[in-house]
């Protein structure tokens, strides 16, 4: 079975909602399942998501990570988790697996792209194959809200704004893209 591990940290719930939308896209690909995990569930209102175990990194067929933007960078709880994956790095547990990143920010120029790039760097060190959102995704071309070729993004404007239809479709498409790549690599 091919499975995509989606790891996120969410401050106000937007990143968690994006993780769910991405998982929906993953599940649309035949023979692929999604596993949603958080790095810290203290902000998880309903306690619905389990905290990730490092052993799940080795077991996954692909990895997607998401974080709110904090000063143009990923949030510290996600960075703290990534910093504990040295053994997995030495063992090559993630080498050759597809990966992607997503973010939510409270302002239009809050650092979405730098956050996405900052999350890609450790994945590259792990030997992962990074995939973004291609311009063939029509919602990326048409969006007036979030979305970048580096990965899905959402602009929440201080948590006042729901995820837009374009942002939702970009998340779903992205999940399908990573799942399709993982399935092809595992066939």
Image (cartoon, helix red, strand yellow):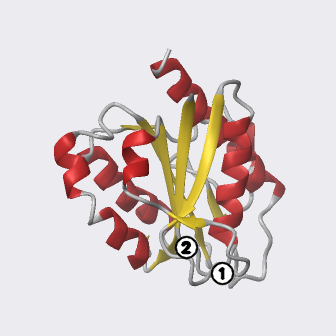
Location of mark 1 (residue): 12
Could you say which quadrant of the image residue 180 lies in?
top right
Question: Of residues 18 and 60, which is closer to you in this image?
Answer: 60
Query: Mark 2 and mark 1 in contact (Cβ < 8 Å)?
Result: no
Q: Position of residue 146 (x, y in %)?
A: 66, 60
Tell me the element at label 1. Answer: loop
Q: Quadrant of the N terminus?
A: top right
Work out whether residue 58 can be spotted.
yes
Name above or below for residue 92 compared with residue 80: above
Residue 173: give x, y in percent of width and height.
69, 39
Identity of the residue drawn at 47% across and 38% down:
62
In the rendered view, tell whether residue 169 sits above or below residue 144. above
- Return the residue nearer the eye: 182 or 134: 182
Residue that badge 2 annotates: 109
Q: Residues within 10 Å of mark 1 (few under 14, many from 20)?
A: some
Up/down of 171 relative to 1, above or below:
below
Q: Is residue 74 visible?
A: no
Splitting the image into 4 quarters, where does residue 157 fall?
bottom right
Instruction: Determine the CA span between mark 1 and mark 2.
Output: 18 Å
Q: Quadrant of residue 33?
A: top right
**What residue is rendered at 76% in x and 53% in y?**
168
Picture mark count: 2
Residue at image location 68% in from the left, 85% down from the top: 158
């Amino acid at each position: 079975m091919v499975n995509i591990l989606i790891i996120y940290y969410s401050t106000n719930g937007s990143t968690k909602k994006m993780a769910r939308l991405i998982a929906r896209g993953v599940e649309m690909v035949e023979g692929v399942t999604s596993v949603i995990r958080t790095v810290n569930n203290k902000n998880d209102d309903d306690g619905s998501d389990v905290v990730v175990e490092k052993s799940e990194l080795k077991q996954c067929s692909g990895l997607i990570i998401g974080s709110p933007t904090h000063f143009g960078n990923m949030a510290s709880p996600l960075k703290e988790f990534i910093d504990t994956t040295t053994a997995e790095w030495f063992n090559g547990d993630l080498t050759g697996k597809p990966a992607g990143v997503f973010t939510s920010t409270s302002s239009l120029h809050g650092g979405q792209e730098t956050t996405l790039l900052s999350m890609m760097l450790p994945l590259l060190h792990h030997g992962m194959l990074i995939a973004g959102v291609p311009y063939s995704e029509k919602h990326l071309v048409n969006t007036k809200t979030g979305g970048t070729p580096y990965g899905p993004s959402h602009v929440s404007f201080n948590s006042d704004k729901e995820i837009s239809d374009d942002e939702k479709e970009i998340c779903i498409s992205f999940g399908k893209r990573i799942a399709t790549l993982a399935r092809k690599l595992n066939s």
